[in-house]
Image: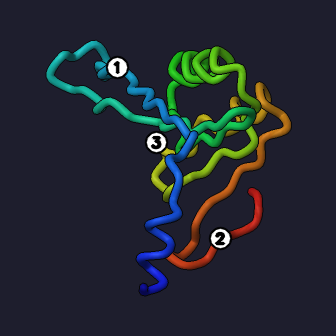
């Protein structure tokens, strides 16, 4: 039996869950023909802890996502920023203020994890 077969055979179902928060469409300067696309943030959590993937740039969305995290009863340990576009990290400071124990992480290169901000 190959090593891969042994791993597959002994694998157990994961107890991790995820929830995706999607912000509403944002109308720019009151013009319905100018909009900012919805942004998503994913929460991955187990029995006690949670990791959030990407932030949201709008204050009301950051607060709503924070409320969703609190509703799970899990401790937010990490905020992972997937890349440097502003709509993926601008809300991080507000999250850090609400969840001061959470560490912010980012990925500089596909194979290298980096230090906290």
Residue at image x 50%, y 47%? 13
For label 3, the crowd category at 10 Å Cα-Cα, with few meaning under 14, some 14 to 19 and many 20 or more, is some
Residue sitting nearer the eye, 62 or 111: 111
Residue at image location 61% in from the left, 37% down from the top: 45
Q: Is residue 80 left or right of residue 34?
A: right
On the picture, is 8 further left or further right than 16?
A: left
Extreme-right residue of the structure: 101
99, 117: nearer the viewer: 99
Q: Nearer the viewer, mark 2 or mark 3?
A: 2
Question: What residue is pinned by disc 2?
Answer: 113
Task: Give the CA separation, mark 2 to mark 1.
Answer: 31 Å
- Please report contact status of discs 2 and 3: CB closer than 8 Å, yes or no: no
User: Could you tell me which quadrant the C terminus lies in?
Assistant: bottom right
Could you say where residue 11 lies in the image, as x and y percent from the top left?
51, 60
In this orientation, which residue lies closer to the viewer: 56 or 77? 77
- Per the image, the residue denoted by label 1 is 24
Q: Secondary structure at mark 3?
A: helix
Determine the CA span between mark 2 and mark 3.
Answer: 21 Å
Mark 2 or 1: the one toward you: 2
Which element is circle 1 on? loop
Please tell me how many numbered marks the rendered image carries: 3
């Amino acid at each position: 039996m190959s090593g891969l077969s042994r791993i597959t055979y002994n694998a157990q179902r994961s107890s991790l869950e995820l929830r995706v928060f999607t912000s509403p469409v944002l109308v720019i300067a009151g013009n319905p023909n100018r909009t900012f696309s919805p942004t998503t943030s994913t929460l991955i959590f187990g029995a006690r802890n949670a990791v959030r993937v990407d932030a949201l740039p709008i204050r009301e969305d950051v607060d709503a996502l924070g409320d969703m995290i609190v509703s799970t009863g899990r401790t937010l340990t990490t905020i992972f920023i997937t890349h440097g576009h502003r709509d993926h990290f601008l809300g991080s400071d507000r999250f850090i203020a609400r969840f001061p124990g959470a560490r912010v992480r980012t990925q500089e290169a596909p194979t290298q994890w980096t230090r906290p901000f």
